[in-house]
Image: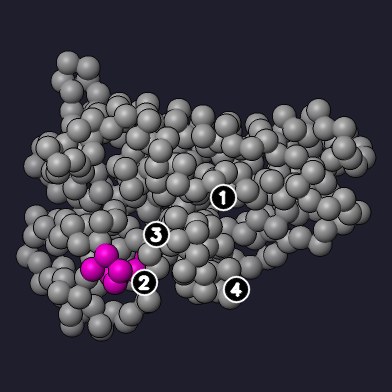
Amino acid sequence: MELGESVGVGIADVQSAEKPTCDHQESKETYGWKARVNGWGADGTKCSGENLYKEEPNGMWPLRVGHQKDMSLGVVPEKKSNAHWASVGLDGVTESDFPLQAHHLIPKNHLPRHPVVVWLCQKWSKDGKFQLAEDTEYNTDHANNGYAMPDALRLKEWKSAASDGDRCGVAFRVMDLTKVQLHQGSHAADLDPARIRAILESGQMPTVTPASGTGDSDDFEDAQIHDAGYLNDIDTWLGAVAKRIEDHVRFCTAGCKTSESGGKTLVRPLADAVRLMDRVSYIAKVFMQMNLLFACPYGAAYAKSRHLLQWDSAAGRYFIYKDSATGPQELTVADVQQALSARSR
């Protein structure tokens, strides 16, 4: 499966999800919902990795059992101190216990710039045709938008590493032990052949954005933690969500449209908008697990070193492979579709 082909699989997944409809919620004059979206949501709380991880009742830690079993979003380890990881190092890292970064699958500082917010927050005024009468209850800090990912920065082996190569070895070992991509450093860029080959085939080792590792690296998106390669795919899937909702609103005869104001159609918020947003989060998580989307350069370098990301010189493209008993096998669209079906839509 070609690396770039995967984006279309995500679009198809959003398009095949159950259509949004007014029938999925009670008919009320108002709902009293308050969205949490930086700068636009009526909730007003600033989104953070700390909230995503521990906030009651919807954080990853309070919902940790369902997060893994029902939501298929992965294990949620208990957060341990920097001193703990500096002491135990790699000996303490397992699939269920690692230095934790609570990662917003739809990044908290990027979502507020996407036009899909017109279907989440009443305050969004940039759409020329529609405006919500009130917020949905979408919460960027909800466990549905969270993925527990490891970093290596707090480990004693990282601190004592003498070179980028040594640090890369520690990063690879963390991914070996956790079976999850690293979440540190700048997210991989467009992953076009020229860029990725320059980074991964020239002998150059990935480096870490200086701001990373001082706390929750998800708090450093503005320091290029999330770069174009990750965000381009997220934007595409959010665009598919926006189109699905608009297609419903335009033809709805069940009272979705409430009135006209200032040349715009006022629309009641849809509970299904939250469901579709959660689907984008889930697609991103599955794609990272299958090396179709990379959280940082270490993830891409690791996949290539394990022959799960292979360059086809004749085609001039990267192809994605999966582990098998007989060695790496090319990933198929059916494989991705099966992985996505682990959680209902």
Q: Earlier in the sequence, mark 4 or mark 3?
A: 4
Q: Residues within 10 Å of mark 1 (few under 14, many from 20)?
A: many
Disc 4 and disc 3 in contact, CB within 8 angstroms: no
Please tell me whether mark 3 sits on a helix, a strand or a loop: loop
Please tell me whether mark 1 sits on a helix, a strand or a loop: helix
The quarter of the rendered structure image containing the N terminus is top left
Q: Earlier in the sequence, mark 2 or mark 1?
A: 2
* Left or right: 264, with 84 as reference point: right
| Mark 2 lies on residue | 77
Whole-number angstrom distance, CA of label 3 to CA of label 1 = 15 Å
Whole-number angstrom distance, CA of label 2 to CA of label 3 = 10 Å
Disc 2 and disc 3 in contact, CB within 8 angstroms: no
Instruction: Identify which residue, 218 or 181, lies in the foreground.
Output: 181
| Mark 1 lies on residue | 278
Q: Earlier in the sequence, mark 3 or mark 1?
A: 3
Q: Amino acid at mark 3?
A: Gly
Residue 320 appears at what percent x and percent y?
Answer: 26, 33
Image height of 224 relative to 233, above or below? below
Q: The magenta stretch spans which residues?
A: 94-101
Please tell me whether mark 4 sits on a helix, a strand or a loop: loop
- The disc placed on residue 57 is 4
